Image: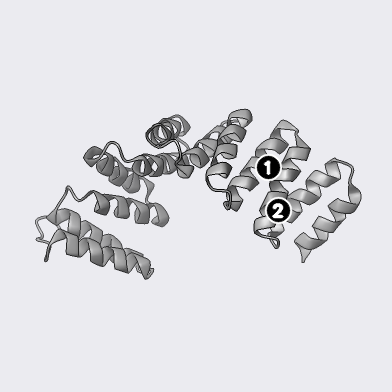
Amino acid sequence: PTAGAVAIGPAKARYNMALNLALQGQYQQAILEYRNALESDPELKDAHTGLGILLTWKGDLPAAEKSFHQAIALDDQDPLSYARLGMVQLKQKRFAQASESLERAAAIDPDLYEAFYGLGLAAARTGHFEQAIAHFAKAAILNPTSSETHINLGVAYVQLGDLNKAAQAYNQVLELDPNNGRVHLYLSDVYGKLGQSHKSAEHREKARQ
């Protein structure tokens, strides 16, 4: 809305409309409705959160970060808001700030998968692969069906030269997603380095298929 515009209808109704639009994939309209809701009620935390999520998807990271900061200002004990803030900071390659936000999320909720997955990414992207492995391993326990967690765990093991554990992590992905071509390619590379040429060729062919 333009400056000074008056949002029509109660804030909660506008929030519910935004949520429904987002679920239907109408993201730009949903963003407008979240902003309408917040113009009516700036303290509607869920609207700040929803807006931040959509702005993240849209790639407007500074605006998304602002939304998550506003959500945290309204509830500084919400671990998901800290985790989402950390992921936005991570996308902007502000690794120290991202780690701080994600550590705050993990401190509030030690069982929050998003926090440990994000911490793993932050550690890996700054070359701290032992820390990354610890975080990804914790994330894998909290959410064992996350293929991306196992893939990143495998990549971290490769960086440290532990190819056998990398293969274990990649094979865990194939139990979840047998047709994951990227992982078959990774396994082909790992088994090739381990001297297991038959397995390497087998996975290369599956990747090609």
Image side of residue 185 versus residue 14, left or right: right
Residue topped by disc 2: 183
Q: In this view, does 132 lie above or below 19?
A: above
Pick the front one: 172 or 117: 172
Alpha carbon separation for disc pair 1 and 2? 10 Å
Image side of residue 18 versus residue 174, left or right: left
Relative image position of residue 32 (x, y in whole percent): 25, 62
Residue depicted at 70% across the width and 56% down the height: 174
Quarter that holds the N terminus: bottom left
Which image quarter: residue 10? bottom left
Quarter that holds the C terminus: bottom right
Q: Earlier in the sequence, mark 1 or mark 2?
A: 1
Relative image position of residue 106 (x, y in whole percent): 43, 35
Which image quarter: residue 7? bottom left
Image side of residue 128 versus residue 80, left or right: right
Outermost residue on the bottom side: it is 24
Q: Is residue 95 above or below residue 66?
A: above
Report crowding for label 2: few under 14, some 14 to 19, many 20 or more residues within 10 A (C-alpha).
many
CB-based contact (under 8 Å), mark 1 and mark 2: yes
- Residue 1 visible here: no
The amino acid type found where label 1 is placed reads Gly
